[in-house]
Image (tube, helix red, strand yellow):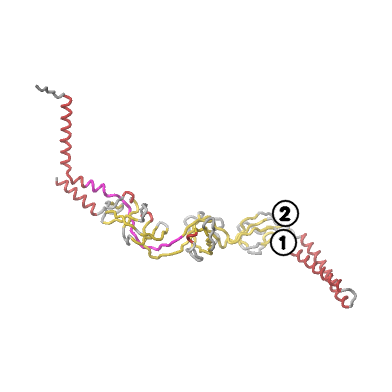
Amino acid sequence: MATRHPFRPGLRAAAAALVLAAALTACKKGEGGPGDAQAKEAEVEAIPVEVTKAARRPIAASYTGTAALEPLADSQVVAKTSGVALAVLVEEGQQVKAGQPLVKLDPDRARLALAQAQAQMGKLENNYRRAQQLVAQQLISAGEVDQMRYDLENARAQYNMAALELSYSTVTAPISGVVALRSIKPGNFVQINTPIFRIVDDSRLEATLNVPERELATMKPGQPVLLQVDALPGRTFEGVVDRVAPVVDAGSGTFRVISTFTGGNTLQPGMFGRIRIDYDQRPDALVVPRVALLDDGEPAVFVIREGKAARVPVKVGYVDGEWIEVREGVKTGDQVVTAGKVALREGSAVQVIGGEAPAKAVADASAAKSAGSEQ
């Protein structure tokens, strides 16, 4: 005879609770219906994105780099003679012309030396004239006349040297430009060959770029150059490529490109700036923002078509700032995704931020909600 094991009271209560929970779950699924599930699925699939239309605009191929501005000419003015500075005639920041007096040194010693040389030269000139008369009368030899002529030429050279030394007492500007540094004051004793001024020619400024050798065929004199300097934010200055060094440095693999800019009160020597050299122009290129390109190897963008994302391979051309040229793959007016593309896959439904919801996604969601309400 088989033995029966009665249910314990605790197990019987647990079984009843499980049956009740299953019944409630089935009722809730029946009430919601498939329509609400489809609507929720449609809402989840619509990924918010930002888009920009592919458009046509001018674009330039360019090379960019950084360099400091240098003056066309830079001169250290030195004293060519010694003496006390009686007057300093210019100040820092003042424009000067070549040959303009800068400093007056005490000229007394040089004047005395010149007077002495002049007297000696005059004496020898008189002696030589008398000797020419005497040699005609054969009263002196031709050798003595030659010696007098030599002495006279030597005296004239000494006179010219004394005159030059006197001219050095007035220090003049060797080039035209602006006084960048003054290191002398009135009353100072100046030693010969002592630097006392620095003059820079800021009428034209130069910037030298060391460009990789792969760009050698693209750089030509006369190409337009744009400059932005840190000291003057928001401003752009125009220049031109002045010359291109034809030799590539074997150590660095670069060659020198020198650009020139108009100087003056705005641009100054020593300013550091970013330089852009445009070596080709396309006036009507189809472009998209650079941020639209996908970072997965092959150049491609997401294009919005019928409310869904389509991955489109593209062939790119020139890069100009934030824009990149598209040679193949998209056409004018196509909406390309610029933000939110990381979450996209081929065929993903999208919601354009700032625009209307995709028509198909809205229609699917509406139909699903209607079906749910009918049940």
In this view, 43 is above or below 21:
below
Instruction: Please identify the quarter of the rendering in which residue 76 is found.
Output: bottom right
Q: Residue 364: within the magenta?
A: no
Q: Find disc 2 in the rendering and name its residue.
A: 189
Instruction: Please identify the quarter of the rendering in which residue 18 is found.
Output: top left
Few, some or many C-alpha atoms within 10 Å of disc 2 (few <14, some 14-19, many ≥20)?
some
Pinpoint residue 170: horizontal percent, then vertical percent: 70, 61
The kind of residue on which mark 2 rests is: Phe
In the drawing, does residue 33 fall left or right of residue 184? Answer: left
In the drawing, does residue 34 fall left or right of residue 144? Answer: left
Region in magenta: 39-62
Nearest to the observer: residue 67 or residue 295:
295
Find numbered disc 2 in the image and state the secondary structure of the residue it sits on. Answer: strand
Q: Quadrant of the C terminus?
A: top left
The kind of residue on which mark 1 rests is: Tyr
Q: At 21% from the left edge and 52% from the top edge, which residue is drawn? A: 363
Instruction: Specify the label residue 7 is tagged with.
Output: none
Instruction: Specify the label residue 168 is tagged with.
Output: 1
Q: At 47% from the left edge and 56% from the top edge, which residue is drawn? A: 234
